[in-house]
Amino acid sequence: MSEERVRTNPPRRRGPGRGPGPIEKPNDFGAAMKKLIKFLKPYYAVILISLVFAAAASVLNIIAPSKLKDLTNEIMVSQFGLPINMQAVAKAGITLIAFYAGNALLNYVQSFMMVGVTQGTGKRFRTSISKKINAIPLSYFDSKPYGDTLSRVTNDVDTVAFSLNQSLATLLQSVVLLVGVLIAMFVTKWQMALTAILTVPISAILMVIIIKRSQPLFVAQQRYLGELNGLIEEDFSGQNIIKIFNAEGRKKKEFDEVNAKLYATNKNAQFVSGLMMPLMTFISNLGYVAICVVGAILFKGDPANMAGVIVSFFVYVRLFQNPINQLGQAFNQLQSTAAAAERVFEFLEEKEQDDESEKTFVPDTVRGEVEFSHVRFGYSPDKIIINDFSAKIEPGMKVAIVGPTGAGKTTMVNLIMRFYETNGGDILIDGVSVKDMKRETVRDMFSMVLQDTWLFEGTIRENIVYSKQGVTQEMLDEAVKAANLDYFVKALPDGYETILDEDSNVSGGQKQLITIARAMIQNSPMMILDEATSNVDTRTEELIQEAMDRLTSGRTSFVIAHRLSTIRNADLILVMKDGNIVEQGNHAQLIAKNGFYASLYNSQFEQA
């Protein structure tokens, strides 16, 4: 786009030298998790089945210690001179093996199901984001760094999927296991059960303290990660400018500052959350000691049963402590999930463009009459840059829009294409307001070539044809020749099938010619050229002008140009200043008037 596009838009961090974006507020953990749970609605049935499998696995894990107690008691009789009942020992051993094997199988199945849930959730997120990107207005990208948006699509979605996979299944199984073990302990020996659960309040208090300390750190970690991605994106895209102005030191300093913040935040978050396991292990060991002491007191006169009960309680305490520890780790993961999920939902909840499903008007033919009627517009409501713009363009006219940087030239084109909506007034095509037509309908009427070239990785043929259907080789050859690109294509070993990628040795001018050929092959009723020849040499520019004159014959065309010598043959020249048309007419009329246009035109030759 032209320079004035950058000036008239709200600032966005895209090129070198821009400062960091605004710091986001910490997220609401509860609100983010509610939204995520609602988002998981399609998987409720699978999650429920997984819960059943997790419960069954936990039941087997809970019953196993009772069989271990019987096995231990059978073996302990040898301490009193009695023979060991090997048949009973074998039976108990086989039962234990069956229980643990069943537990492993059920855990595998439920884990496999939960992987499907988490990966499906990640896929749904990416699909929703892809649809959202096409539904939100361009004004969103004017105020948000591209790198931060990319971070939400990639890093944050991956974090949600990974954390869910690590935490959701663990939460399900831990809750079931915790409840089941509590019941089993009270059934076995309620006094020892009370001793074991005395460690729970201590663990819970420590867990709450750690979560409160670590949650803000995880939120900041995701925020700084998005900011770092934004810096990387702008630095990579602006390498030429950075090197030209020897700004490597400054950009390195900016990167190091954000990277240091991310490092410190990540380090602190991992340190605080990492305290969870050692503290829980310490509390668990205290529980083992308490079980031994209480067991010795309770079974003082019954040593034959003491060993079996204490061994089974050791297993119960381990099973009891494990879900508590796992719950701590799961909540730790959920903090990352909440921090990332809120950033994703924040993007998904951005205001979309108005629904236009009721607009069904599609013109049978497009004559190309365009009328601006008292148009008023500003990229922000408090800063109006076009105050009262009125002009009528007859079908087939070649209209040049000229003026100093910031006058509103590209803004007018953006309004014609409905990239933005007017704050007042109206724009009509063939007497019909663009507001009464879908955006797609309006944009189908135009081919557009911008100053900023955009090519994707693919063949030259694919880049030129793009979304146009039914393009024949003859049509392609004609467009390429008209754009003065045929010499370039013929010189390539693979011709039209040459792959364009980052390693392709294609000049800026050649890229521009490809985008011009792309616009030509669309064969739209109207054409917009926004500094379309700015990246080509003078001779090529003249050839393109001749081709454009042939192609725009009978079509309404809008040409934005800073080099006024290129639009002398325009049927109508609109001279803009401060958002208003101050003069209009053809080149000869405006020169004869000796006004603002004449001063702009003559200024090109003053140096010479």
Image (spheres, grey):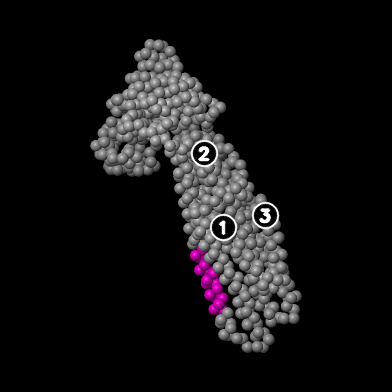
Q: Is residue 230 left or right of residue 264?
A: left
Q: Is residue 76 left or right of residue 443?
A: right
Q: Residue at x 55, y 60 (%)?
A: 169
Please provide the residue range marked out in magenta.
93-110
- Residue 606 seen in the current view: no
Quadrant of res 585 = top left
Front of the two marks 2 and 3: 2
Compute the Cα span from label 1 to label 2: 31 Å
Compute the Cα span from label 2 to label 3: 36 Å
Give the mark nearer the N terminus: 3 vs 1. 1
Residue designated by label 1: 167
Q: Residue at x 55, y 72 (%)?
A: 100
Give the mark nearer the N terminus: 2 vs 3. 3
**Number of the label disc, if any, that sits on residue 208:** 3
* x then y, percent, for residue 92: 58, 79
Residue nearer the viewer, 224 or 199: 199
Counting other residues with Cα less than 10 Å from the Cα at mark 3, is it few (<14), some (14-19), or many (20 or more)?
few
Local secondary structure at mark 3: helix
Residue designated by label 2: 351
Asked whether the residues under the numbered discs 2 and 3 touch, taking CB atoms below 8 Å apart as contact, a structural biologist would say no
